[in-house]
Amino acid sequence: MIETDFLVIGSGIAGLTFSLKVSNHGKVMIITKKEKAESNTNYAQGGIAAVMSPLDSFDSHIQDTLISGDGLCKREVVEEIIKTAPIRVKELIELGVQFSKSEDGKDYDLGKEGGHTHRRVLHATDFTGREIEQALLTAVSNNKNIEIHENFIAIDLATENGQCIGCYVLNKEDSEVVEICAKITVLATGGIGKVYLFTSNPDIASGDGVAMAYRAGASIANMEFVQFHPTCLYHPYAKSFLISEALRGEGAILLDNSGNRFMEKYHELKELAPRDIVARAIDNELKKSGDDCVFLDLSFKDSDFIRKRFPNIYKTCLSFGIDMTKQPIPVIPAAHYACGGVKTTTSGETDIKNLYAIGEVACTGLHGANRLASNSLLEALVCAHNAANKCIEQIKKGIGFCEVISWIPNSTVDSDEMVVVSFNWEEVRRLMWNYVGIVRTDKRLLRAKRRIKNLQEEIAQFYRDFKINSDLIELRNIADVAEIIINSALLRKESRGLHYTLDYPEKSNEPSDTLIRIRARNNQKK
């Protein structure tokens, strides 16, 4: 059994920022289920939105966010996060993050993405996430009060009398379960993209934080709002590679298989319309034509500009035989970001004492029904700072350890039927893509609900009968998250933002959040 003051689950921008800020006030343990650099942050191409230009304003950024959120953003949250953004971004710069600058090197080269009325997206060419991740990891590695455990995958939160007291964790290297007692536990686990068949997310994004918080009894909000990024590279060997919205910000246009531009039929902003509109437009074009993909064309721009502005995308596309300086890129929408999550304040507080959630796993009310591009890294940065301040206050008041009961395995038998796990994983992701995708109906949702219940029963039986492993943990989590998304979608009897249903095509006059919660007992392994 391990004791720590702060247990941080996840090693992206939210978890690392929080860890650095609390490290002078106690022992910090970060656990991550793969290598420490493997996070959604590391794959973020576009950038981080903040008002950094005299031509821009807080009011403009706030208004863009509210419009994108389609009536469900919490205005006070939007104002707080956007107005503190420049301060938090400057802290990243002080840590060594090298954002791209203009040709003369005097100003930052601010990008423009869908839904933004001004150029305000700081980026490091198209390696923004990697640049931020490396700067934060360097700072963490030099901090003697922080330790990182790689290949530690969280199984379940440990709770007692309505408070979180730690976590059960599988050490993947020796297949042993570790009990971690923590005064404060922070979920910074990232997204849920692997719940869907096509996603821009890395393999780690299996919704672990949302699933664990749900099983522990925390409130989960607005999970029907899954953002599908309009442009993921479509190629049989290109796994989860995102084609950044920044290409459209630089003038790239969308074409159908016949070379015709189509976005002007759907929105006055054409390719720079909010993501939900662009994704729905592509989905509609593909359904009409029966084609597998559409095409994103920037080849009319200067080839040197393309290679300099998008070196990662250029190099990756070229590795698949696509020269974006000479030809359009085949693209398809893919699950990208969860606007919903564990319901929190802007300080990461959940409705379980001593449990915090920050970053994509959390639902603060910033994004509403649809996230404005490049607001995600911003939210993670600001809320990690706020959560750190709140947790330091709690630690100073004095929090004791509660002993986590030792893990007793259900079985010591290794499964000889891992093919069943793989099959169930594929089935969950395919049914979510087919029935709970960009356009929905109650008939499809109810069919998905029936099937996910059957799958959960199969998974639970497997979980009881065999020794636990990381594949089974993730399968259980994606099934639980799938159930939450389905039930949330059934609750919303309107079309709003990212949730579009043919049965209720109009918006409600009284928009509200959806909340999913189960009554959890003390969650300790008996």
Image (spheres, grey):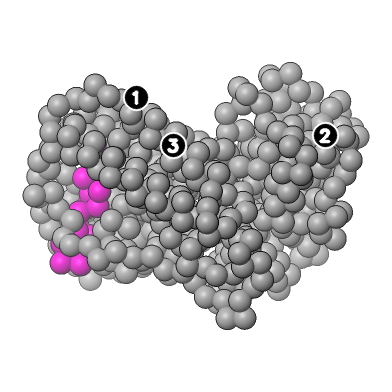
Q: Under tag 1, what secondary structure?
A: helix
* Tag shown at residue 257: 2
223 over 249 or under it: above or below: below
Q: Quadrant of residue 261?
A: top right
Q: Under tag 3, what secondary structure?
A: helix
Does residue 329 appear anywhere in the picture? yes
Residue 520 placement (x, y as % from top left): 22, 62
Residue 330 placement (x, y as % from top left): 74, 32
Q: Name the residue under label 1.
A: 419
Q: What residue type is labelled 2?
A: Asn
Q: How crowded is mark 2: few (under 14 residues within 10 Å), some or many (20 or more)?
A: some
362 over 514 or under it: above or below: above
Q: Mark 3 points at which residue?
A: 427
What segment carries the magenta color? 154-170
Q: Quadrant of residue 334?
A: top right
Q: Which amino acid does label 3 sit on?
A: Glu
* Tag shown at residue 237: none
Q: What residue type is labelled 1?
A: Val
